[in-house]
Every structure is written in structure tokens, then in C-alpha cells.
Image (cartoon, rainbow, N blue to C red):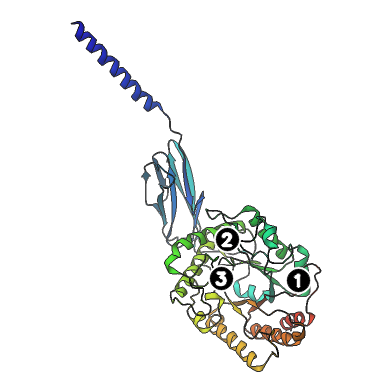
Amino acid sequence: MKRNKNIMYLLLVFWVVITGACSSDDDIKVTPEFSITLNGNDVNELIFNSGSSFQMVAIKSNVEWNVSGNQDWCTLSNSSGEPTLTDYQTVYLKVEVQSNIGDIDREALITLTAGGETKTVKVTQYSSNVVEPEEWENAPTVVKNMKVGWNLFNTLDSYGSWITGTSPSDYETAWGQIITKPELMKAVKDRGFNAMRIPVTWFPHLDENGKVNEAWMNRVEEVVNYVLENDMYCILNVHHDTGGDESAWLIADLDNYDEMNEKFISLWTQIGERFAGYDHKLVFEGYNEMLDKNFSWTNPSDPNAFAAINKFAQQFVTTIRTTGGNNRYRNLIVNTYGGDPGENAVSNFTVPFDEVADHLIVEVHVYEGTDFESEGTSWTAQREQALSNIMDRLNTYFVTKGVPVIIGECGTPIVSEKEEEIAKYADYLIRSSKQYNMACFWWFDLIDRSEYQWRSEIVTDALINAIQE
């Protein structure tokens, strides 16, 4: 009998230990850690144009989670999920909206709950009835009013593995220029120019998640403000992230399109959100001279490169339109393959769809007949004809169809003994483009940036006088 009591006692102790342990496990509280992100960044609002579309957001959580929406027109691919046990596990939630055929914007709310805590994401979908401010200029008006412009070249567009510093000034001066000051923009405006193109190379200033360095973004905005404060139009772009060397990550290549596109969307989302409140004198240019994976100029070695350019152009427009504010109707610039004005490039370029009429601009770069550094070179009737052929082609493919054109880069270095010939070229360039209301942006040095003296009064006069007559 005593033996049976001992066994019963041991069983009782075992039961107490086991139940106590289980009770302790149940009492352990896991602090919920969860996030909902878009392109690697925390998100609290998703913005959609009026058409049916979707966006993919990423959910990570160390506990079980539930998600719900409050509007039938906004649907979610998942309603719940298990904990993601490592940093590498991510659940993608598809947020899909139906077309908004109403006259007003609409909103929905997505609620994510995990471990008793919640996060919300507002969904805004625009109506197709976009009403611009009364003073907002459309693309043809903006291009006509730009008249003639200049590029702030070799400045914010610099890059190189040999640049040892990390500050904005280290890059701004890396290619031989001095720090840009407001006085430079005043001198340009006072001389008769009415627009500036600000080339910016972004990739040296992105972290591993594609986030732009805050100091760099601040400096870019500061220089943009220098332009706008002098009542000029300003073009802001993505520059040597494209181009003809191994540093380029933005390439006209369908095989790697999805990976590049995610980074492209993230970059333009950040730029768009920073400048969403700026008025119509700020214009965005989606990309500079984008080339195929073999860096082929003029004619791509991969015929699919044209399709890739067209996809990036459309994505740029779609992305900016969803960043809100004045970006709903901001004038946007898209380039042909490599910025080339040739028949092959322009005939294979598709102007993107835009829900807002008359707010897209096509850009090309024209360096035809500019080799004045060669001995004996002069401006001839043959060179005039070649330049006229380009202008006529751009008019046929774009201007006659209601899409204005800018010559985003043109010009030649100033050669003192060829000033008069270069002035003839400058005069003809402006006059031949002006007949189709195109605006030209000179690339090369026209002004001493420290003394604000013009390097060639003859050439500068030719540019300004031709646009004013």
C-alpha cells in the first residue's frame, strides 16, 4: 500500500511540474514586431491613379497577423499570415483597386493587426477628373516659354570610385567645378536664358535599400531653388545612372527589367514626394541617355532595348502621377533611346499613356555638325541641312501630334579661333528649333562660374538674339 502511495505521489509531482511548465509557456508574452513596406520603405499611404491597378506591399511580423480593408473597390490578396521567422521571409500583399469612374477622389483604409497592435495604411485613388490650378501651364506652353536654356553640367552629375569624400560638396566639385551659388543662376537669368537643366547622378548617394542620402537630397533641392528663385524653369533628372559605362544601373534591358524597375520606382517616388509641392516651373526628366546592356549608341544591339525604353518611360509617368500634390499634373520629360534624334530611335519610341492631357514632353540630344575643334571646320549649308532634317523629323513624329520637344543637350566647346563659326551654328540651331516651338539647352561652358563672365559674347549673343527675334 505504501508503494502505491509513493507512485501516486510521484505522478502528482510530475503532473504539477508539467502543468506548471505549460502554464509558464502560455504566460510568456511575445512583443509584436511587424512592418508593412513598399520598395523597402515603411508606408502609411498608397496612391493610385483612376484606372484599375495594383501595388505589392511587403509584410513582416514575428507573430500571427490579420489584415482587412474597409472598401469593396479596394481588395487584398491575403487576410492573415503566419510569423516570418527570419529577416529573409516576407509575405507580399497585393492591394488592388478598381477603376474610379466618379468625379472625386476616394479613400480606403487598410488595417494590419498583429499581437493586439495595429498599423493602418490609407489608400487614395484619384478620379479621372483632374482639375489643375488655373495658373498651371501645360507642356507646349512650358516648352515655348523655356526659350533657351543651359545645363549645369559636370556638377551634381559627377561620380567615380576615386572620389574619397562622401559629402555633397565632394561630389559637386569632383569634376572640376566650384560649389554652385545663387549668383550663378542670377547671371544666367540676367543674360537672357529662361531655363536650367540640372543633371543629377543618384547612385553614389543611395544606401543598400535604395534610399537617397538626406544631405544629397537637400543639396539637390537647394540648387533647384536657386533656379526657381530667379524665375527660370528647372529640369531635374536622373543622369549618369544611365549611360555608357559599367557604373550605369538603369539599362534598356528587358531581361533584368524587374530588378531595375523596383529601384527606379523607389528613386522617383522619393524625388517626387520631396518636390510634390513645387509649381509648374519644375519639370522632371525620367532618365538621361539610357543604352542597352552593350552600351550601344544610336542603334541598340538588342532590338528589345526599344521596348525596355518604352516600359521605363511609362513607369516613370505612372510613378510620378501617384506621388501626389502637384505631381498629379506636373510636366514630365521622357527620352528616346540614348536621347538619339535619328529615325530608328524616334520611330521606335512610344509616348507614354498619361491620364492628364498635354503634360508630356519628348527629349532628344543633338550634336549634329558641332566638331569645330577640327582644323578648317566651318558652318556650311550641308550642316544646316542636316540640322534641319533632324528638326523636321522631330516635328513629324511628335510636335504635329501634340507632343512638344526639347533639345536637352546641344552645343560645342568654345574654340576662340572658331567663335564666329560656332555663333553661326548657335544662331541656326535656335532658329530651326524655334519654328517648331522647341527649346534648346546648351551643354558646354558658356560662363566662368567664379567671376560670372561670359566666355564668348559672340556665341552667347547668337543664342539669345535668335530666340528673341
Q: From the viewer's side, name the closer residue of 358 and 266.
A: 266
- Horizontally, residue 101 falls left or right of residue 282, namely left
Q: Quadrant of the N terminus?
A: top left
* The C terminus: image quadrant: bottom right
Q: Which picture quadrant has residue 61?
A: top left
Mark number, residue 203: 2
Label located before the other in sequence (3 or 2):
2
Q: CA distance from mark 2 to mark 1?
A: 29 Å
Q: Hey, what amino acid is under mark 2?
A: Phe
- 55 versus 145 height, above or below: above
Residue at the top extreme, as displayed? 2
What residue is pinned by disc 1?
A: 188
Position of residue 238 relative to residue 31, above or below, is below
Residue contact between numbered discs 3 and 1, judged by CB atoms under 8 Å: no
What is the distance, in whole Å, between disc 3 and disc 1 at their CAs? 28 Å
Q: Give whichever of 129, 353 is nearer the camera.
A: 353
Question: Can the viewer see residue 354?
Answer: no
- In whole angstroms, how far apart are the C-alphas of marks 3 and 2? 12 Å
Residue found 39% across the figure and 53% down from its top: 75
* Residue closer to the observer: 99 or 205: 205
Q: Quadrant of residue 112?
A: top left
Residue 356 in the image, given as x and y percentages of width and height? 53, 68
Q: Element under label 3?
A: loop
- Judged left or right of residue 140, residue 373 is right
Please state which amino acid type lies under the numbered disc 1: Val
